[in-house]
Image (spheres, rainbow, N blue to C red):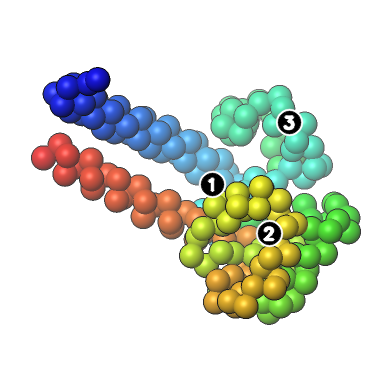
Amino acid sequence: MRTREEILIYQKWYRENKRDKRKHNADGRKRHEEVRNKVFTLYGTKCSICNYDEIRGLELDHLNDDGAIERRKYQQKSLYVKILKNEVDLNRYQLLCINCHANKTWGHFSHTSDTSVLKGRLLNALGNECTVCKETRRGVLQIDHIFGNGSQHLKSFGRSVCRMYKNMLIDPERDSKYQVLCALHNRLKFYNNTARQESLELLSDALEVA
Ligand SMILES: [Zn+2]
Ligand SMILES: [Zn+2]
Protein backbone atom coordinates (compact mmCIF):
# COMPACT_ATOMS: atom_id res chain seq x y z
CA MET A 1 0.00 0.00 0.00
CA ARG A 2 1.16 3.52 -0.73
CA THR A 3 1.80 5.96 2.04
CA ARG A 4 -0.02 9.26 2.01
CA GLU A 5 3.21 11.00 1.07
CA GLU A 6 3.72 8.74 -1.93
CA ILE A 7 0.19 9.41 -3.09
CA LEU A 8 0.72 13.17 -2.82
CA ILE A 9 3.95 12.94 -4.82
CA TYR A 10 2.21 10.88 -7.47
CA GLN A 11 -0.69 13.32 -7.66
CA LYS A 12 1.71 16.25 -8.08
CA TRP A 13 3.62 14.41 -10.82
CA TYR A 14 0.36 13.55 -12.59
CA ARG A 15 -0.93 17.14 -12.51
CA GLU A 16 2.32 18.54 -13.84
CA ASN A 17 2.51 15.98 -16.60
CA LYS A 18 -1.00 16.73 -17.69
CA ARG A 19 -0.14 20.41 -17.70
CA ASP A 20 2.91 19.82 -19.90
CA LYS A 21 0.90 17.71 -22.28
CA ARG A 22 -1.76 20.40 -22.56
CA LYS A 23 0.87 23.01 -23.29
CA HIS A 24 2.48 20.73 -25.88
CA ASN A 25 -0.89 20.20 -27.61
CA ALA A 26 -1.68 23.91 -27.51
CA ASP A 27 1.69 24.79 -29.09
CA GLY A 28 1.23 22.20 -31.84
CA ARG A 29 -2.23 23.48 -32.61
CA LYS A 30 -0.98 27.05 -32.76
CA ARG A 31 1.70 26.10 -35.29
CA HIS A 32 -0.88 24.17 -37.32
CA GLU A 33 -3.19 27.19 -37.32
CA GLU A 34 -0.42 29.49 -38.51
CA VAL A 35 0.35 27.25 -41.49
CA ARG A 36 -3.35 26.80 -42.25
CA ASN A 37 -3.99 30.55 -42.11
CA LYS A 38 -1.20 31.19 -44.61
CA VAL A 39 -2.69 28.63 -47.01
CA PHE A 40 -6.19 30.04 -46.61
CA THR A 41 -4.88 33.56 -47.25
CA LEU A 42 -3.36 32.26 -50.47
CA TYR A 43 -6.83 31.08 -51.51
CA GLY A 44 -8.53 34.36 -50.60
CA THR A 45 -9.96 33.29 -47.18
CA LYS A 46 -13.48 32.80 -48.48
CA CYS A 47 -15.77 30.05 -49.76
CA SER A 48 -15.58 29.67 -53.56
CA ILE A 49 -19.33 29.06 -53.69
CA CYS A 50 -21.02 31.37 -51.15
CA ASN A 51 -18.20 33.76 -50.12
CA TYR A 52 -18.44 32.87 -46.42
CA ASP A 53 -15.24 34.25 -44.89
CA GLU A 54 -14.77 33.29 -41.24
CA ILE A 55 -11.55 31.29 -41.11
CA ARG A 56 -12.79 28.71 -38.57
CA GLY A 57 -15.60 27.79 -40.95
CA LEU A 58 -13.45 27.18 -44.04
CA GLU A 59 -11.92 23.97 -45.39
CA LEU A 60 -9.64 23.08 -48.25
CA ASP A 61 -11.51 21.09 -50.89
CA HIS A 62 -9.93 18.78 -53.44
CA LEU A 63 -11.48 19.83 -56.72
CA ASN A 64 -11.07 16.37 -58.24
CA ASP A 65 -12.45 14.67 -55.14
CA ASP A 66 -9.26 12.72 -54.61
CA GLY A 67 -8.82 13.93 -51.06
CA ALA A 68 -9.02 10.45 -49.57
CA ILE A 69 -6.21 9.16 -51.78
CA GLU A 70 -4.12 12.19 -51.03
CA ARG A 71 -4.67 11.93 -47.30
CA ARG A 72 -3.15 8.47 -47.45
CA LYS A 73 -0.07 9.98 -49.06
CA TYR A 74 0.42 12.88 -46.67
CA GLN A 75 -1.32 14.39 -43.66
CA GLN A 76 -3.19 17.64 -43.92
CA LYS A 77 -0.44 19.64 -42.28
CA SER A 78 2.19 18.43 -44.71
CA LEU A 79 -0.18 19.17 -47.59
CA TYR A 80 -0.41 22.75 -46.34
CA VAL A 81 3.37 22.95 -46.23
CA LYS A 82 3.61 21.55 -49.76
CA ILE A 83 1.16 24.15 -50.98
CA LEU A 84 3.18 26.95 -49.37
CA LYS A 85 6.37 25.61 -50.93
CA ASN A 86 4.65 25.32 -54.30
CA GLU A 87 5.38 21.60 -54.47
CA VAL A 88 1.86 20.69 -55.60
CA ASP A 89 -0.48 22.03 -58.27
CA LEU A 90 -2.39 24.81 -56.49
CA ASN A 91 -5.26 24.58 -59.00
CA ARG A 92 -6.23 21.20 -57.57
CA TYR A 93 -7.68 22.88 -54.48
CA GLN A 94 -10.25 25.46 -53.51
CA LEU A 95 -11.62 26.83 -50.27
CA LEU A 96 -15.15 25.94 -49.32
CA CYS A 97 -17.11 26.72 -46.18
CA ILE A 98 -18.01 23.71 -44.08
CA ASN A 99 -21.58 23.76 -45.42
CA CYS A 100 -20.76 23.97 -49.13
CA HIS A 101 -18.12 21.28 -48.55
CA ALA A 102 -20.58 18.99 -46.73
CA ASN A 103 -23.18 19.54 -49.44
CA LYS A 104 -20.72 18.64 -52.19
CA THR A 105 -19.61 15.48 -50.38
CA TRP A 106 -23.22 14.50 -49.63
CA GLY A 107 -24.04 14.60 -53.33
CA HIS A 108 -21.49 11.87 -54.04
CA PHE A 109 -23.28 9.19 -52.04
CA SER A 110 -26.69 7.57 -52.12
CA HIS A 111 -28.64 7.95 -48.92
CA THR A 112 -30.89 4.96 -48.73
CA SER A 113 -29.54 3.19 -45.64
CA ASP A 114 -31.80 2.73 -42.60
CA THR A 115 -29.74 5.28 -40.72
CA SER A 116 -30.17 7.87 -43.50
CA VAL A 117 -33.91 7.29 -43.66
CA LEU A 118 -34.22 7.60 -39.88
CA LYS A 119 -32.10 10.75 -39.92
CA GLY A 120 -34.45 12.22 -42.54
CA ARG A 121 -37.47 11.46 -40.34
CA LEU A 122 -35.74 12.97 -37.32
CA LEU A 123 -34.82 16.10 -39.29
CA ASN A 124 -38.45 16.43 -40.41
CA ALA A 125 -39.65 16.06 -36.83
CA LEU A 126 -37.23 18.73 -35.66
CA GLY A 127 -38.12 21.31 -38.31
CA ASN A 128 -35.67 20.62 -41.16
CA GLU A 129 -33.61 23.81 -40.85
CA CYS A 130 -30.59 25.02 -38.90
CA THR A 131 -31.72 26.60 -35.65
CA VAL A 132 -29.09 29.35 -36.06
CA CYS A 133 -29.05 30.31 -39.76
CA LYS A 134 -32.15 28.60 -41.24
CA GLU A 135 -30.01 26.65 -43.75
CA THR A 136 -32.14 23.91 -45.36
CA ARG A 137 -29.84 21.97 -47.72
CA ARG A 138 -30.39 18.35 -46.71
CA GLY A 139 -26.74 17.33 -47.04
CA VAL A 140 -25.72 20.04 -44.63
CA LEU A 141 -28.16 19.41 -41.79
CA GLN A 142 -27.12 17.54 -38.67
CA ILE A 143 -28.85 16.56 -35.46
CA ASP A 144 -27.34 18.19 -32.42
CA HIS A 145 -27.58 17.14 -28.78
CA ILE A 146 -28.37 20.52 -27.26
CA PHE A 147 -26.69 19.64 -23.95
CA GLY A 148 -23.62 18.21 -25.65
CA ASN A 149 -23.86 14.61 -24.42
CA GLY A 150 -23.95 13.06 -27.89
CA SER A 151 -21.00 10.69 -27.63
CA GLN A 152 -22.20 9.31 -24.28
CA HIS A 153 -25.67 8.88 -25.73
CA LEU A 154 -24.30 6.99 -28.72
CA LYS A 155 -22.21 4.78 -26.44
CA SER A 156 -25.35 3.80 -24.52
CA PHE A 157 -26.68 2.29 -27.78
CA GLY A 158 -23.49 0.32 -28.41
CA ARG A 159 -22.42 3.02 -30.91
CA SER A 160 -25.31 2.18 -33.21
CA VAL A 161 -26.47 5.48 -34.74
CA CYS A 162 -29.49 3.70 -36.13
CA ARG A 163 -30.68 2.54 -32.70
CA MET A 164 -29.98 5.96 -31.21
CA TYR A 165 -32.04 7.71 -33.90
CA LYS A 166 -34.94 5.29 -33.37
CA ASN A 167 -34.91 6.13 -29.68
CA MET A 168 -34.68 9.88 -30.34
CA LEU A 169 -37.67 9.72 -32.67
CA ILE A 170 -39.97 8.36 -29.99
CA ASP A 171 -38.50 10.38 -27.09
CA PRO A 172 -41.32 12.52 -25.65
CA GLU A 173 -38.74 15.18 -24.69
CA ARG A 174 -37.25 15.14 -28.18
CA ASP A 175 -37.86 18.80 -29.01
CA SER A 176 -36.15 20.10 -25.87
CA LYS A 177 -33.12 17.77 -26.10
CA TYR A 178 -32.23 17.85 -29.79
CA GLN A 179 -32.07 20.47 -32.51
CA VAL A 180 -31.10 20.75 -36.16
CA LEU A 181 -27.83 22.54 -36.87
CA CYS A 182 -26.04 22.99 -40.17
CA ALA A 183 -22.56 21.44 -40.33
CA LEU A 184 -21.00 24.87 -39.93
CA HIS A 185 -22.89 25.86 -36.79
CA ASN A 186 -22.41 22.41 -35.30
CA ARG A 187 -18.64 22.80 -35.78
CA LEU A 188 -18.60 26.33 -34.37
CA LYS A 189 -20.51 25.07 -31.32
CA PHE A 190 -17.88 22.35 -30.88
CA TYR A 191 -15.03 24.88 -31.20
CA ASN A 192 -16.62 27.20 -28.67
CA ASN A 193 -17.12 24.36 -26.17
CA THR A 194 -13.52 23.23 -26.65
CA ALA A 195 -12.23 26.76 -26.19
CA ARG A 196 -14.27 27.13 -22.99
CA GLN A 197 -13.00 23.79 -21.68
CA GLU A 198 -9.40 24.75 -22.45
CA SER A 199 -9.65 28.12 -20.77
CA LEU A 200 -11.05 26.39 -17.67
CA GLU A 201 -8.10 23.97 -17.69
CA LEU A 202 -5.60 26.79 -18.15
CA LEU A 203 -7.21 28.61 -15.25
CA SER A 204 -6.88 25.56 -13.01
CA ASP A 205 -3.23 25.17 -14.12
CA ALA A 206 -2.60 28.79 -13.19
CA LEU A 207 -4.24 28.30 -9.79
CA GLU A 208 -2.10 25.22 -9.14
CA VAL A 209 1.08 27.06 -10.02
CA ALA A 210 0.19 30.03 -7.82
ZN1 LIG B 1 -20.02 28.18 -48.79
ZN1 LIG C 1 -26.46 27.20 -39.57
- Tell me the CA gap for discs 1 and 3: 22 Å
Say above or below: 159 vs 181.
Answer: above
Say above or below: 147 vs 7.
Answer: below
Q: CB of residue at label 2: within 8 Å of ligand 2?
A: no
Seen from the viewer's position, the closer of residues 59 and 121 is 121
Residue plotted at (74% across, 42% down): 62
Looking at the rendered structure, the secondary structure element under dot 3 is helix
Quadrant in the picture for residue 93 = top right
* Residue that mark 1 sits on: 41
Looking at the rendered structure, the secondary structure element under dot 2 is helix
Q: Mark 2 or 3 closer to N-term?
A: 3
Residue plotted at (26% across, 32% down): 15
Residue plotted at (56% across, 32% down): 77
* Residue that mark 2 sits on: 164
Q: Position of residue 80 (x, y in %)?
A: 59, 34
Seen from the viewer's position, the closer of residues 130 and 100 is 130
Q: Label 2 amino acid?
A: Met
* Residue extending farthest front: 1
Please indicate whether residue 187 sits to the left or right of residue 27 in the image: right
The quarter of the picture where the C terminus appears is top left
Q: Is residue 12 visible?
A: yes
Looking at the rendered structure, the secondary structure element under dot 1 is helix
Q: Mark 2 or 1 closer to N-term?
A: 1
Q: Mark 1 or 3 closer to N-term?
A: 1
**Mark 3 Cα-neighbour bin, 10 Å: few <14, some 14–19, many ≥20:** few
Please indicate whether residue 80 sits to the left or right of residue 205 in the image: right
Residue plotted at (52% across, 40% down): 36
Q: Label 3 amino acid?
A: Glu
* Residue that mark 3 sits on: 70
- Tell me the CA gap for discs 2 and 3: 33 Å
Foreground mark, 2 or 1, reads 2
